[in-house]
Image: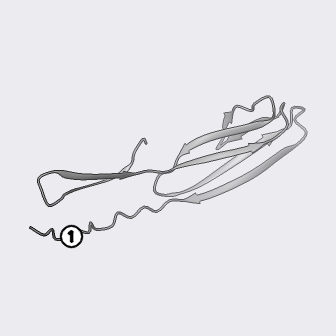
Amino acid sequence: MKSPVVSRYRSGGSKQFEFAVDAELIVFGTTCADASVTLSGEPIAVRPDGSFTVRLQLPDRRQVIPVVADSSDGIESRTFVLAVERNTKVMEPVIRETEV
């Protein structure tokens, strides 16, 4: 987790209760083994079977991610545009009374 949302609160004792959450986006697909693929303009590796996988950070904002495959002869190009949005909200802690 590169930049998790972290919440730290003191519980009933002096010990701090920590909780962290993060998210990633995995983009995967298939094409011809000799095609070239870019994601947001950056080349990505295509495996010998034509499959590809990329893991991306998923920051708190909207992202538009174009994925383009070009045929090896340069005649054909295909594009997918992914639009994703992450909105993380840290809720207030729930602290219960403990019986003595």
Tell me which colouring the rendered structure shows. one colour
Could you say whether the residue bearing mark 1 is in a helix, strand or loop?
Answer: loop
Residue farthest top in this picture? 48
Q: What's the residue at 80%, 35% (across, down)?
A: 50
Task: Tell which residue pokes out farthest to the left in this image.
Answer: 100
- Nearest the eye: 64 or 24: 24
Q: Residue at x 80, y 28 (%)?
A: 48
Q: Quadrant of the N terminus?
A: top left
Residue 42: quadrant of the picture: top right
Out of 75 and 33, give the one closest to the viewer: 33
Position of 40 with respect to 90 (left or right) is right
Residue 71 versus residue 75: which sits nearer the camera? 71
Q: Quadrant of residue 82?
A: bottom right
Residue 72 appears in which quarter of the rendering? top right
Is residue 39 shown above or below 90? Answer: above
User: What number of labels is visible?
Assistant: 1
Residue at the spot 39% in from the left edge and 45% down from the top edge: 3
Say which quadrant the C terminus sits in: bottom left
**In the image, what residue type sits under mark 1?**
Arg
Does residue 24 sit above or below 97 in this rendering? above
Q: Is residue 45 above or below residue 12?
A: above
Q: From the top left corner, tell me how far across and down residue 84 is, in percent.
A: 59, 58
Residue 53 at what x, y percent from top left? Answer: 67, 39
Q: Residue at 91% of width from left, 39% of height from top?
A: 75
User: Viewed as shown, does residue 6 lie left or right of 65?
Assistant: left
Residue ranking furthest to the front: 100
At which x and y percent is residue 92?
A: 28, 68
Which residue is tagged 1?
96
Q: Residues within 10 Å of mark 1 (few under 14, many from 20)?
A: few
